[in-house]
Image (cartoon, grey):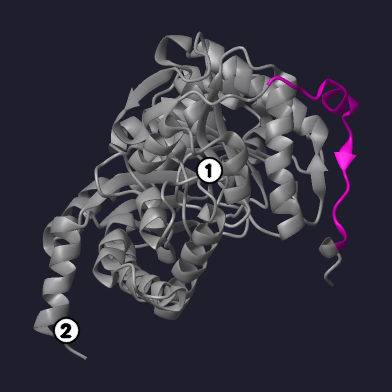
Amino acid sequence: MPLTDREILETIRMFELETLDIRTTTLGISLFDCADPDLESTCEKVYTKVLSHARDLVAVADSIAGDYGVPIVNRRIAVTPISFIAAASGAQDLVPIARAMDAAADEVGVDYIGGFSAYVHKGFTRSDAALFDSIPAALAGTDHVCASVSLASTRAGINMDAVVRFAKVVKDTAQLTRDEGGIGCAKLVCFCNAVEDNPFVAGAHIGPGEPETVLNVGVSGPGVVRSALERLGPEADLVAVAETVKRTAFKITRMGELVGREAARRLGTTFGIVDVSLAPTPAVGDSVAHCLELIGVDRTGAPGTTAALALLTDAVKKGGAMASSRVGGLSGAFIPVSEDQGMIDAVRAGTLSLAKLEAMSAVCSVGLDMVAVPGDTSAAVLAGVIADQLAIGMVNSKTTAVRIIPVPGKGPGETVEWGGLLGTAIVQDVGPAGCEVFHGRGGRIPAPLQSYRN
């Protein structure tokens, strides 16, 4: 069916006035055939393979943006978790692989390359341990590399030994990048129920079930949703609000799939999924928080915020599922505190706290994202915050994540400016109490009863 003039004008308005864009085209590349007993050979193979498959990614994205008038903000690469690839070498220092990834990403001109990753929700291999030990130096010594680890799942429970170890990795990474406000931690995330086709950083990687290469797309439309809710007005009931968001998500998803399929065709690869997460930016009008306030809360973090976010996330998922059979990734609504101007304003106003963010994470796409905490926060407290978040994902059979930044030299209420997409963070108060005994017990939190689903 041909597009009507009204539909064409509506789409143009979304791009020109409502900050709609393709947030990322992410090319997934399997590196399993790069494993080699010699670490130097592994690095060479990784560099060569990424170059051979991703050389045209930026040019293709630019050509599609020009042909269709669709803004494509980021071009990224996701690879097989490096702990899998490095195992054959037995190497203890995996920073050389991170440098090879970074050099390849720089050569092809992408923003980030994800996949300096490990799955340790049930335990560590020697390669997993080497990767954990290498993360701080890898993130401090590269520009484009992102790291992620799976620490828990509904089927396995929470590996608290891994959580404790990860908390130390976060502290070390912050210290190695202290001159940049601990920015290395912005490229580091941990997961419960990690997904294998996530196109968004810092968690982007491709799991063992993915093809040789695959093109995944992440769309973003908080500005479009905000405009639709403004036109709806405050007199509409919540069913009407949900329907409005659902219809808007449908349109956004269709546009994302069109771009994804065309990008995959031009690159000669497989089209994977479209992730329909509402991913905000610091730009004015591109805020998930402002959408929640249009639904009806005075300020994000006020009573009713979690319910409004549940409505928003569910409606986005339903609209995406109606529009495409290839919806995947995380898909819903992101709440990265430093990257959303409405969230920043809410923290500054005192309505949005760490505890409220944790409650909100029970109903949104991911979890505690881009949360700044005091630089002197102990590893025990970090481990407790991370474990709380993973528990929400484990019990609710959903993906949750933590991207937390202990900002060296900063205390509660102080501000750190990272600029660009990473935005501005106001350091959150973690409270006076800790969890040293809990932190020290180690072991695993067993999988919940709902894990027995066979």
Against 118, is 392 above or below? below
Q: Nearer the viewer, residue 170 or 10?
A: 10
Tell me how far mark 1 sits from mark 2, CA to CA. Answer: 36 Å
Q: Could you tell whether 189 is left or right of 284 in the image?
A: right
Residue 186 location, x and y as percent? 48, 29
The dot on residue 186 is none
Characterize the local packing of mark 1: few (<14), some (14-19) or many (20 or more) Cα atoms within 10 angstroms. Answer: many
What residue sits 37% from the left and 44% below the top?
Answer: 76
Q: Is residue 243 magenta?
A: no
Element at label 2: loop
Query: What span is in magenta?
Result: 432-449
- Residue, x 34% and y 72% (percent of image)? 235
Q: Which residue is mark 1?
A: 203
The residue beneath circle 2 is 3
Of the image marks 1 and 2, the number of the one nearer the N terminus: 2
Q: The disc labelled 2 sits on which kind of residue? A: Leu
Whether pointer 1 and pointer 2 mark residues with C-beta atoms closer than 8 Å, the reply is no
Q: Vertical placement of 377 versus 201: above or below?
A: above
